[in-house]
Image (spheres, coloured by chain):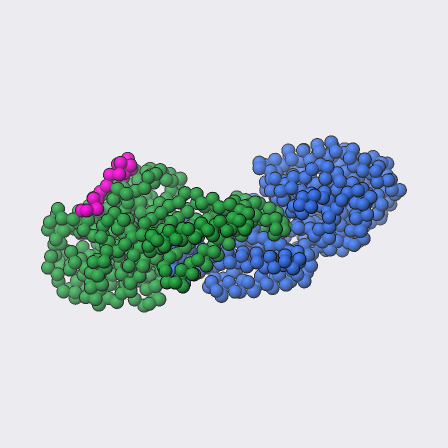
Chain colours: A blue, B green
Amino acid sequence: MDAPDARTIKAAIQAQRASMQALFDQLRQDGLDEPGVSRDTYGAGEQRAHATVTKAAEALGLEIAHDDAANLYMTLPGRDRSAPVLVIGSHLDSVPHGGNFDGAAGVLAGLATVTALRTLGLTPDRDIVVMGIRAEESVWFQVSYIGSRGSLGTLPEGALDVRRVDTGRTLADHISDCGGNPEALRTRARHFDPSRIRAYLELHIEQAPSLVEAGVPVAICTGIPGNFRFPDAWIEGRTDHVGTPRRFRHDAATAGAEFAIALDQLWADYDQRNIPMACTLGRFHTDPAAHGLTIVPGTFHFSLDVRAYDEATLAELEDKVGRIIQGIEQRRAVRFHLGQQARAAVGMVDPAIKAGLEAAARAQGVPVLHIGSPASHDAAAFAAAGVPMGMLFVRNENGSHNPHEAMTIEDFLDGASVLAQWLTTAT
Amino acid sequence: MDAPDARTIKAAIQAQRASMQALFDQLRQDGLDEPGVSRDTYGAGEQRAHATVTKAAEALGLEIAHDDAANLYMTLPGRDRSAPVLVIGSHLDSVPHGGNFDGAAGVLAGLATVTALRTLGLTPDRDIVVMGIRAEESVWFQVSYIGSRGSLGTLPEGALDVRRVDTGRTLADHISDCGGNPEALRTRARHFDPSRIRAYLELHIEQAPSLVEAGVPVAICTGIPGNFRFPDAWIEGRTDHVGTPRRFRHDAATAGAEFAIALDQLWADYDQRNIPMACTLGRFHTDPAAHGLTIVPGTFHFSLDVRAYDEATLAELEDKVGRIIQGIEQRRAVRFHLGQQARAAVGMVDPAIKAGLEAAARAQGVPVLHIGSPASHDAAAFAAAGVPMGMLFVRNENGSHNPHEAMTIEDFLDGASVLAQWLTTAT
């Protein structure tokens, strides 16, 4: 397509300020679960978000489709309908009592971008598919990238039989509820052959305050961390009376504390060497059915997420975590049971897309940072399948996965402008 | 009374092997709540234990009485019924899923001792009162020594309005259920004027494996630790997304871990200097309603019990805990909320009773250790009221406050022999 000038593109995005604000407000209303919003994965909350976004896409005249994983595809047809498509996507679920923008901002940025093309009377060379992805938040099923990997036929073995932590029902059942076809997913049926995707682009709120700290509205992603995870690990010690002398104890909670502090020191060391990583003990607890003021904890439970930006660092960290555990087991006469391990590969950003986004930001006059994504994103699943991938982050106060995340509509429109600029010039 | 020889006393105790075993078996049956036994404080479990012990005391022809706190008194009348009485007591409640001997062994040792006197046709100079004490296990109401302090009129302000952690009902209501009179307790009515008690003796299983380690059946107590406690403390941090860089985090769980490790190091230091103390984080947990694999914990909850054998050490430890907390608050930008503090005074053992028990053990040929009590005991409440106090510990495998505690009947009878020997010679 013929690229309009940057100012025209910016105006076409800015013109959507009110409609985008209204769409965000509707999504907040749909998901309201004070404090914050809950768009539960393959549940009522996510369903309402899909309905609202579908309605908006229908009003724009986009083609609506779904796949076996109940992902939502909203397509602006291109000149050559057989050419590999361009996907702009993000997820529509949220953590319990999360914020309104985590995920949804990326889907709305896709809608804003295709709306701008429509307004400007531009027909893209290829189909542009805005994708509302299912089940990105692994807190529900403790499996990552369910929707995007379902779409690509790369869902891991056994995932469909995992149970949602709150309902206790299987992923397969939940997918069925939402109109998907879990049996087809079992045969690794896929909606997308990766070779049929020209590129995958995702805008997402930043899930850390780096942009707030720097006073910059938008960041270009340099990579998505891979991770290894132990969702349900525990430490076996021995329950004892509160007066038990130190030399006799096998205190599982103190062993857990030593583990946490060793990981924290490991992280501090990597920070000092400027090797980005992160390490989180999200669940970290004595057993509510057995603990008490006068009982030395005999068991201790935790979840662990360790993430880094290259596979070598991840492998090194895994080795170091293993050594830390060995040391604690010996020193404290306890035993770690790590349970099932989950993994996500590092998501490499396509250098040409990254350069294109930099040029687009310059053209739009939007100042940008370059940051490694603090979080995991569906974009990593596309990258893992061989799809050229790029991401933008939008400034967000108060972190994410909590009710206080805060993105301004101005920053959102800046991010969408960069996306639209890239789309009209780079494809 | 005229003291029989040591061999005669031993025989009178050994003769009760079967009846004592049967009584322990009945108590286990009464409290069975797999794994282990639950004799809930002022609840159905404790009630059944009281009924069983009362029945046994009635069969022995002891006088039965109760006080406003529903404690049980089983009296062998002495020659001079107006002389200050001798109390042999312990508690009949247990922790949830605890062992069968914690508490009950002391009450049964009292019954075995008075039975021995009866068998030998001895009438003591003064009344001997076997006391089945209520509510020693502070896990239920998070208040210590409820029964013994109720008996002595030293129950702390507000205790009657505290709620049981599981039922949510007040101590006053629970006492009423069990035939007590909480309104009388409010006026500090007491069953015992401390000056009317010649001595308080308690036999208890050891709640640590020192005797097992040393291969000795019985220990003579050198003191009962005082403590300070924070039953419901928590740390306020900030909930964040799993990818949040280290420099931005206010991770409440890692702050809790640093606290645990600092306390553990403090304890190791005291151990090295041979100053006995103990320190337990019994509850130590992220919030089950909010935690998850991909959420940096914003709050962290714990209970703390710190105990030592003299008031100066306790005061020093309290000061050090305060400094540790200050340091963590500064380093990790979190805030500790310690909530209500509970305290128990150090229980000093009467030197003459201690010497008498040593002589009695020698006479009975029972090898003994001298140890500071690892745990708190009702004996400390009597000592705090000015009653001369002494304690014996009986060897116990696998610690206490768990289903695996294990005392042999042989060790129990050894302990009871020492008690009976002391009683016939020292009173």
Residue B121 in picture, x, y percent from top left: 11, 57
Look at the image and tell me whether residue B318 can be seen: yes
Residue B188 belongs to the span the image colors magenta: yes
Residue B291 in picture, x, y percent from top left: 55, 47
Which of the pair B291/B247 is nearer the observer? B247
Residue B29 in picture, x, y percent from top left: 32, 52
Which of the pair B151/A30 is nearer the observer? B151
In the displayed structure image, the side of residue A58 where residue A333 appears, left or right:
left
Residue at screen point 27% across, 65% down: B368
Residue at screen point 21% across, 57% down: B353
Q: Please, which residue is most extreme toward the right here?
A: A2
Which of the pair A341/A351 is nearer the observer? A351
Residue at screen point 16% across, 48% down: B84
Q: How many marks?
A: 0
Residue A260 belongs to the span the image colors magenta: no
Residue at screen point 66% across, 58% down: A275
Q: Is residue A263 above or below residue A139?
A: below
Give the magenta part as a residue range.
B179-196
In the displayed structure image, the side of residue A130 where residue B265 appears, left or right:
left
In the displayed structure image, the side of residue A259 where residue B162 appears, left or right:
left
Residue A65 in picture, x, y percent from top left: 75, 41
Image quarter of the N terminus of chain A: top right
Asked where in the image residue A118 lies, by quadrant, the reply is: top right
